[in-house]
Each structure stands twice: as C-alpha cells, then as structure tokens.
C-alpha cells in the first residue's frame, strides 16, 4: 500500500514530467524549430528536470524532514525537563498523524510524571515531618536517607550523613550492633537504646527487599518523655511512701506508748496525744496539698481571672502572716510602687502563692531577719508582665538545690526541713498556679544570705 507521502511524491513527479513533456512538445511543434532546436530542447528539458528535482526535494523536506527535525527538537526539550513542549501537527498525512500520537504520548507521560512527582513529594513531606527518626541505608550500610527527626536525635548533619556509613553517622555501638544483627538474620530487630544520659530511643531495624535491591529501614522513636513520666511517677510513689512512713511510724510509737503505760499518767498521755495530733496534721496537710496539686494539674478548678490591683494580692497574705512574723521576730516590709498596672489574676490562687512563699520565708529565716514583698515592672526582660517578689534574709538555698526545689516533694535540707515541717509540695503548687496564669516563677538565692522568689503575672489590658 502506498502511503500519502508516496502518493504525493509520485503525483508531483508525474505533474512535473507532464509539464516538461508538454513544453518539449510545444517547442518541437514550433514552425521555427529546425535542427538546432533539438539541442535547445535538450538543455531546456534538462534544466526543467533539475528544477523539478529541487522543487520535489523542497516539498519532501517541508513535508517529512522538517517535521522530523521539529519532533527531534521537541523531544530534546522534553528530555531537558520542559514537559509542556508539544509539536504542532500541521498536515493530515502520516507525519501529522505521527505528531499527534507523539503529543498524546507526551501528554500521558507528563500526567504520569506529575502524579509520580506528587506522590514522591507527599512521601518526602511525610518523612520530613515525621516525629520519629527515619534512616534508610543500602546493603553495605551507607546512608541513603536521613530525615530531620533522625538528624536532630543523633545531632547529625544531612550533608555529612548522606553517603556516609551508618556507623559514622550514628556513632553508637548499640545502634550499629542492631543493624548488623538485622543484616545477618535478615529479620526485624527492635531494641530500646539509651544514648547519652537522657535520650531513650526505641529502635526498629527492618530489611527491605525491593526490585532485587536490599536496603535497611531504621526507625528511631524518642521514648524520653515517656521514660521521664515513668521516673516522675516512680519518684512520686517512693516520695509519698517515704513522707507517710515517718508520721505513721511516729503515730504507731505514740499509740504503743499509750497502750503500754502512758494512759495511766494523764499528763504524759496528753503530751503523747498532742504529738499524735501533730503527726495527723502533717499527714492531713500533705493529703490536702496533694489533692490541691492534682486539681490544679488536671484543670478541674478553672481560673477566675479578674483585673486586680497588685496591692490586693500582697496585702491579704501579709495580714495573715503578720502575727507569725512578729512571734518569730522577723520584720515584714511591703514595697508596692504606686501607678502599677492592674494584673489578670485569680485572687485566691495568687494569695495561696504569696502565702506559700511567705510561710517558707518565715520558716527559713532566723529571728532578727526580714522579709520584703515587692512589685515592679521589668519591661525589657518581661514585657507585658508585673513581677512580684518575696525576699528573705534567711538561710538561703544551695546552688545544686536551686534547679530542683520546684519539684514535688523536694526539700533541700531534709533534716532541717523536717525540723521546720513541710511537705515539699508548696513550691510545686506555686509553680502550677503561676504557670496557669501564663507567668513564670524563679528563685535567686545565696546560702547564708537569703532567698528571693519572683513570679510574673500578665498585665490586664484596657
Ligand atoms: P515545704 O513544704 O517543705 O516548704 P516547698 O515546696 O515549699 O516545701 O519548698 C521546698 C524546699 O525548698 C523546702 O523544703 C526548702 O528546703 C526550700 N525552700 C523553699 N523556700 C525557701 C526559703 N525561703 N529559704 C530557704 N529554703 C527554701
């Protein structure tokens, strides 16, 4: 079967040959045509054939070579990433048909590439934003992928990790062992790995066999917060048992003494009953404070925030502790500048914070000392806040105790604190109350010189 182009070339050949033949025929039939004319005709017809050959060549170029050239250009542009490049099908022949098919193929390929790119981008985003660390290594343990979470956990840098060996990147023998175990067994391996002093990683290494290529997927799950919670819970239980054991033992001793003989001696019995009451008070206070703390932590008692004058937050606890301070020969100094902005506070709760701080200040300050209550603005360091403070000239807190005193049950000097009474919960309660007001609480102290407790409260806006 002849194609359209072949038909066209054949037709053009016939057309040009016919024209030349007609010209030759007309020339030969001219009356003036004599012998020399044959030579003329020969040259004319030769010239005409040459011209027709060029004309056919030109037409063939326009119809076949040029579109092929265009197609090659477009294919090169697509290969260079210009996926929207297309050929314009200008004819209805096979070349036009071919261009249309080429465009269709490019169209469907482009769609596939776009959807593949989208899928890949989604996958990359998921891996990049995953909270768990992800590392993929090749068969020889060279890192092919490491996501930001893994880089953060291992303090690694992407540029320096890619293409490096797993051992170089993780620098931890347990993780390296785990990968090696997975490589030799070709089975998933899971282990809890402790890195440094306070990083716990649940590590899962899985072999992946795909398209005849073997790689390893390493997932790093940060268990540190869960571990920390477990430690807090364990410490909490051990602290509470420890704190209850002492008053209970004391109560038992009192009861046993009373049972033995003290009941017969009313004076002694009264003294022992007084001691029993004291121990019961300690336990009651502890239970109450624990309940208070758990209520604040669970948000059971919502804050009733009101625009409040700072003076009204300090005066009430000062009144409460005035007598106690006088009894202990401690001077109370109140320094509240005029013109302080109002603050947003739940008044009873902040009274509780100031009371706890004042009670501690009185407990840990010897007679002759003083306690100063102050309020101020520190717009540079604490913009939008009012700072309240309770400063004493008491025994102070050691540097190693300072970071821990806001923890539940923490008492800096157990023997002395025990002597002074206290559950170790007061400052934990203060911290929770202040933080629930979006404020901060902190302490500055020097052993032997005194302690200053500060907390910030947000200014009430107009
Ligand atoms: P407690 O009920 O035992 O006072 P807190 O949580 O209020 O519990 O305080 C924790 C510990 O911080 C105290 O046991 C004490 O050792 C230390 N502390 C708190 N306030 C002061 C202070 N003003 N001066 C010295 N030590 C303090």
Image (cartoon, rainbow, N blue to C red):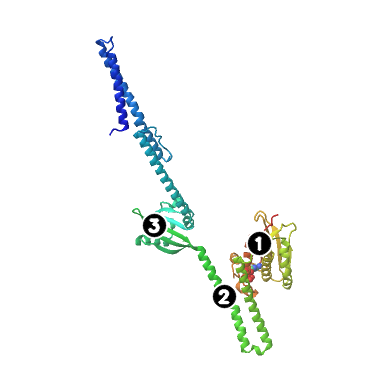
Task: Say left or right for 97 vs 351.
Answer: left
Counting residues from the N terminus, which is met first, the one under dot 1 or under dot 2? 2
Within-10-Å neighbours for mark 2: few <14, some 14–19, many 20+: few
Q: Residue at x 64, y 81 (%)?
A: 276
Q: Secondary structure at mark 2?
A: helix
Q: CA distance from mark 3 to mark 1?
A: 51 Å
**Image-quadrant location for residue 8:** top left
Within-10-Å neighbours for mark 3: few <14, some 14–19, many 20+: many
Q: CA distance from mark 2 to mark 3?
A: 48 Å
Q: Which labelled disc corresponds to residue 216?
A: 3
Callout in the foreground (2, 3): 3
Give the x, y percent position of residue 313: 71, 64
Residues at badges 1 and 2 in contact (C-beta under 8 Å)? no
Q: Secondary structure at mark 1?
A: strand
**Image-quadrant location for residue 4:** top left
Instruction: Please identify the quadrant where the N terminus is shown.
Output: top left
Image region (quadrant) for ligand 1: bottom right
Give the x, y percent position of residue 344: 68, 59
Callout in the foreground (3, 1): 3
Disc 3 within 8 angstroms of ligand 1 (CB): no
Give the x, y percent position of residue 71: 37, 35
Instruction: Please identify the quadrant where the C terminus is shown.
Output: bottom right
Counting residues from the N terminus, which is met first, the one under dot 2 or under dot 3? 3
* Residue, disc 2: 242
For the residue pair 41 and 420, the one nearer the viewer reads as: 41
For the residue pair 451 and 43, the one nearer the viewer reads as: 43
Q: Which labelled disc corresponds to residue 455?
A: 1
Residues at badges 2 and 3 in contact (C-beta under 8 Å)? no
Q: Secondary structure at mark 3?
A: strand
Q: CA distance from mark 1 to mark 2?
A: 30 Å
């Amino acid at each position: 079967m002849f194609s359209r182009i072949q038909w066209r070339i054949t037709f053009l050949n016939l057309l040009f040959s016919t024209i030349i033949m007609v010209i030759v025929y007309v020339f030969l039939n001219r009356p003036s045509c004599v012998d020399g004319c044959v030579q003329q005709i020969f040259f004319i017809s030769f010239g005409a054939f040459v011209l027709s050959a060029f004309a056919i060549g030109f037409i063939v170029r326009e119809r076949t070579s040029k579109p092929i050239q265009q197609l090659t250009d477009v294919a090169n542009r697509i290969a260079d990433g210009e996926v929207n490049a297309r050929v314009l099908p200008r004819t209805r022949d096979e070349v036009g048909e071919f261009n249309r098919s080429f465009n269709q193929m490019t169209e469907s390929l482009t769609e596939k590439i776009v959807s593949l790119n989208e899928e890949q981008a989604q996958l990359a985003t998921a891996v990049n934003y995953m909270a768990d660390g992800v590392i993929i290594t090749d068969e020889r343990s060279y890192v092919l992928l490491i996501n930001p979470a893994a880089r953060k956990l291992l303090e690694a840098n992407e540029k320096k990790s890619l293409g490096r060996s797993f051992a170089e990147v993780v620098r931890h023998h347990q993780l390296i062992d785990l990968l090696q175990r997975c490589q030799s067994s070709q089975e998933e391996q899971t282990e809890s790995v402790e890195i440094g002093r306070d990083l716990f990683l649940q590590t899962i290494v899985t072999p992946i066999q795909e398209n005849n290529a073997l790689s390893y997927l390493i997932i790093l799950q940060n268990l540190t917060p869960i571990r920390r919670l477990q430690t807090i819970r364990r410490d909490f239980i051990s602290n509470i048992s420890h704190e209850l054991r002492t008053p209970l033992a004391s109560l038992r001793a009192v009861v046993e003494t009373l049972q033995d003989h003290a009941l017969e001696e009313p004076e002694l019995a009264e003294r022992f009953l007084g001691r029993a009451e004291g121990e019961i008070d300690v336990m009651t206070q502890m239970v109450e404070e624990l309940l208070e703390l758990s209520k604040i932590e669970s948000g059971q008692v919502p804050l009733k925030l009101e625009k409040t004058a700072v003076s009204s937050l300090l005066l009430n606890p000062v009144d409460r502790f005035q007598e106690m301070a006088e009894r202990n020969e401690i001077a109370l100094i109140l320094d509240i500048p005029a013109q302080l902005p109002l603050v947003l506070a739940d008044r009873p709760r902040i009274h509780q914070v100031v009371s706890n701080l004042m009670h501690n200040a009185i407990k840990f300050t010897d007679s002759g000392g003083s306690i100063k209550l102050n309020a101020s603005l520190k717009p540079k360091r604490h913009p939008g806040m009012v700072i309240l403070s309770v400063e004493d000239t008491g025994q102070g807190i050691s540097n190693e105790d300072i970071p821990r005193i806001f923890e539940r049950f923490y008492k800096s000097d157990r023997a002395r604190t025990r002597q002074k009474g206290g559950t170790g919960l007061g400052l934990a309660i203060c911290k929770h109350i202040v933080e629930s007001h979006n404020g901060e609480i902190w302490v500055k102290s020097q052993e032997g010189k005194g302690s200053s407790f500060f907390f910030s409260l947000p200014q009430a806006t107009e």
